[in-house]
Amino acid sequence: MTSNEDRDTEYGGPFFVPADASDEMGVTTEQAARALAHAGLDRRQATAFFRNRVLAGQVTPCGRVEKEKDGRQPYLFHADQVLLTAILHRLAESGLTGEPLQEAFRVLSWWNADEVPNPPAPTPSSWVFRAYLAGQRNFGFELITVRNTTGRGDVKYSARVRQFNLDTKESVGTHFLDRGPTWERRSVWATDLDPILAHITRNKGEH
């Protein structure tokens, strides 16, 4: 697929980009916006939000479309970056911007080698995306605020992404940062990821 347009006519449903995929398998900004769009967030708004995340360094291109006659050469993104953007938008529409978005970006983009020495995918967001498309469910994202009970009483944010086993009540995934015994949890923001994943991987033509 080398069209520098939306490529919507070539997109037939759920998308998935392996870590070693060629650039031509990437997702364009236009495709990402179509996947993200919903009531209250049209394609134009979704495009603007996605591009702003790129400018903020929270969404990273994996390549570019082959240059065509008009000279345009859109960037390509791994599909899990659409999931990352969808989570960031949920936070933003809840009024959580700045440091909360950066913390979400951090925890979805890198594994802690001490916690997960043999990660199942290149990033936590790609792990969730791949597992969901493979039929696994019960994924969730949580962001907590913690306050230092000493000194100036600083407030920080910490996030994690987990897959929950409803039978055993256990979960796997990333962990909240342990800032030490003087930090106490103050509040939590959480969202189920399954509905988000169902939306961004919906079949073409569904809303």
Image: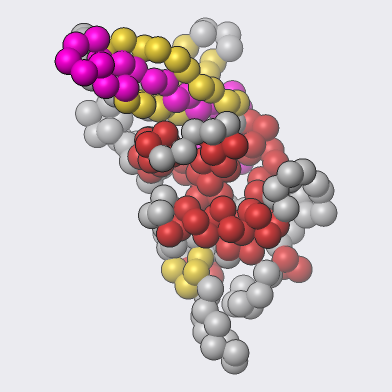
Seen as rendered, the residue at the extreme left is 151
Seen as rendered, the residue at the extreme front is 152
Residue at image point 32% right, 36% down: 111
Quadrant of the image for the N terminus?
A: bottom right
Q: Is residue 79 visible?
A: no
Q: Nearer the viewer, residue 193 or 57?
A: 57
Up the image or down, 7 lies above or below 54; here it is below
Residue at image point 70% right, 48% down: 41
Left or right of 13? Residue 196 is: left
In the rendered image, residue 196 lying in the magenta stretch gets the answer no
Residue 114 appears at what percent x and percent y?
22, 28
Residue at image point 60% right, 90% down: 70
Left or right of 81? Residue 46 is: right
Left or right of 31? Residue 169 is: left
In the rendered image, residue 150 lying in the magenta stretch gets the answer yes
Residue at image point 19% right, 11% down: 150
Up the image or down, 106 lies above or below 191; here it is below
Type of colouring: secondary structure
Q: Which residues are magenta?
A: 127-155
Q: Is residue 138 visible?
A: yes
Up the image or down, 49 lies above or below 167; here it is below
Residue 87 appears at what percent x and percent y?
54, 38
Residue 206 appears at what percent x and percent y?
81, 48
Give the total of numbered labels: 0
Residue 123 appears at what percent x and percent y?
39, 43
Q: Nearer the viewer, residue 196 or 128?
A: 196
